[in-house]
Structure formats: structure tokens, C-alpha cells
Amino acid sequence: MKRLIQNQFMALLTISFINIGLVSAQDNCKVLLDAINAQYEGECKKGLADGFGTAKGADIYVGDFKKGLPDGTGKYTWANGNVFEGTFKKGVKEGKGTLIIKSSDGNQRVQTGYWRKDVYIGEYENPYEVTSRSAGVLSVSISPFENKVTDGDVLIISISHKGRLQQPPQFSLSETVGSFMSRFTVGMTTQVIVGSFPFGFSLGYMNERLEIKIYQKGSYKIDIDYNIQ
């Protein structure tokens, strides 16, 4: 009986030491964001929060960590009550998510979409896309630019034949989404004033067809190269 009691005592003592070791390891697991590094509970690797965990400080974060920073899917709650739930990378918002912004009067505003390096870029991950094109369209280049000349948002369209820029040729342009207000020629380009976004259009030229959708409000240069001599 005495030996049994001793064995039980030693087992309990061993478990206690293991638990103390786990607590100590947890205490030594660092979170590298000052606003949430006061208390951490979760997975750890090489002394840094890594895996799933909960970190608290002035703010609270629950979710995935990598090398001591929020990285992956998680929910971040600020001290002022604002909440972001979505994806993170190296401690900042990156990718798809929803941000709830609370005001002093108790109301809230919800912002859903995509973030890049902690900056909201809009409801869509890419501001534009080529939805379809026929075989004779070699390439389509779309790039946003800051418009300081024309009132409103404008598309500047240029057409090339195998890399050779053409004088603005005649082509058909019809809306598939949104609207445009006018189109006119400036130098070697055709310029289109957009009325509303998202704006999608179908462009027909020399029996070739191209469709583009632009989701994010702004001005864009669109260079189209055709397989035409």
C-alpha cells in the first residue's frame, strides 16, 4: 500500500512538472504585435506563436499565426470595437475579408472585399478582367492611371497589328454592364468616358471579338494587339 501511494504521488508530481513546463513554454511563446502580445494561448514553434491561437492585449486576435504574427485566417478585434474577419499575412490584412467599423453613435458600417498590404482595394480581388476574346486577339494589356486631364473616368484604347500601333480604326463598342457617356478620338487612341461601374463592354474589330469587365472605379489604359498584318 505504501509503495502504491508513493507511485501515485510520483505520477502526480510528474504530471505537475509537465504542466508547469507547458505553462512555462506558453509564457515564453512570443507574439510580435505589441497590441496583442500581453497574453497568448495556442500553438508555438521555436519560441513564437505558430499555428492556431488566441492573443490578447489592447486588442484581441483569434486565428492562425506564423512566426509570431497573424498569418492565415482569423478574427481581429480592436479596442474601439472594430472587427476584421478574414485572411492575414505577416500581421496585416491580406486577401478576402469583412471589416465592421463602429461609430460613436452605435451604428456600424460593413466593408466586404479584398485587402492588399492592409489597404482595401475593393469588392473584387482584381480591378478588371478579360472575360473572353477570339483567336485573333494576341494580347490585351490593362493598366490603371491617374487621370488629370479629362473630367470623369476614362478608358484610353489603342489598337495594334502585331505590335504596330494603328491610327484609331473603327470598332464597335457596346455595354454589357454599366454605361458609358461618350467616345472620341485623341491622337492615336480612342477615349471612352465611363458613366458607371462596374463597367463591362464588348469590342468588335475586323471580325474579332473581345469582352472586358472593369470592377473598380478609375481610369485605365487598354492596349489591344491583333494578329493582323
Image (tube, helix red, strand yellow):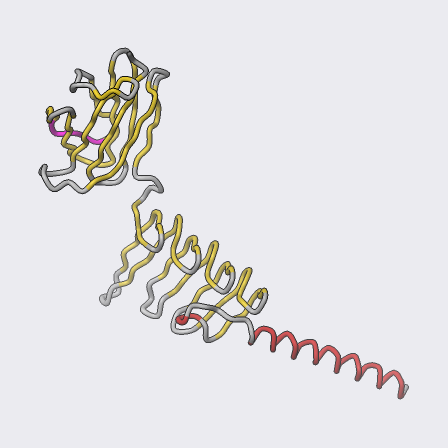
Q: Is residue 48 left or right of residue 122?
A: right
Vertical relation: 45 (above or below) 204 = below
Q: Is residue 86 left or right of residue 14?
A: left
Quarter holding residue 3: bottom right
Q: State whether the magenta stretch is mostly helix, strand or loop.
A: strand
Q: Is residue 1 left or right of residue 81?
A: right
Q: Which residues are magenta?
A: 178-182
Q: Position of residue 154 (x, y in %)?
A: 16, 34
> Looking at the image, which residue sits at the far front?
164
Q: Quadrant of the N terminus?
A: bottom right
Q: Is residue 211 left or right of residue 71?
A: left
Q: Which residue is more in the foreground, 101 or 56?
A: 56
Vertical relation: 124 (above or below) 174 = below
Q: Residue at x 84, y 82 (%)?
A: 7
Quarter holding residue 187: top left
Q: How many marks?
A: 0
Q: Position of residue 21 (x, y in %)?
A: 65, 77
Q: Let me know if residue 102 is in the magenta part.
A: no
Q: Position of residue 92 (x, y in %)?
A: 39, 58
Q: Quadrant of the C terminus?
A: top left
Vertical relation: 49 (above or below) 217 = below
Quarter holding residue 190: top left
Q: Residue at x 55, y 71 (%)?
A: 29
Q: Position of residue 31 (x, y in %)?
A: 48, 69
> Looking at the image, which residue sits at the far bottom?
2
Q: Residue at x 32, y 58 (%)?
A: 100
Vertical relation: 204 (above or below) 98 = above
Q: Which residue is more in the foreground, 217 or 225?
A: 225
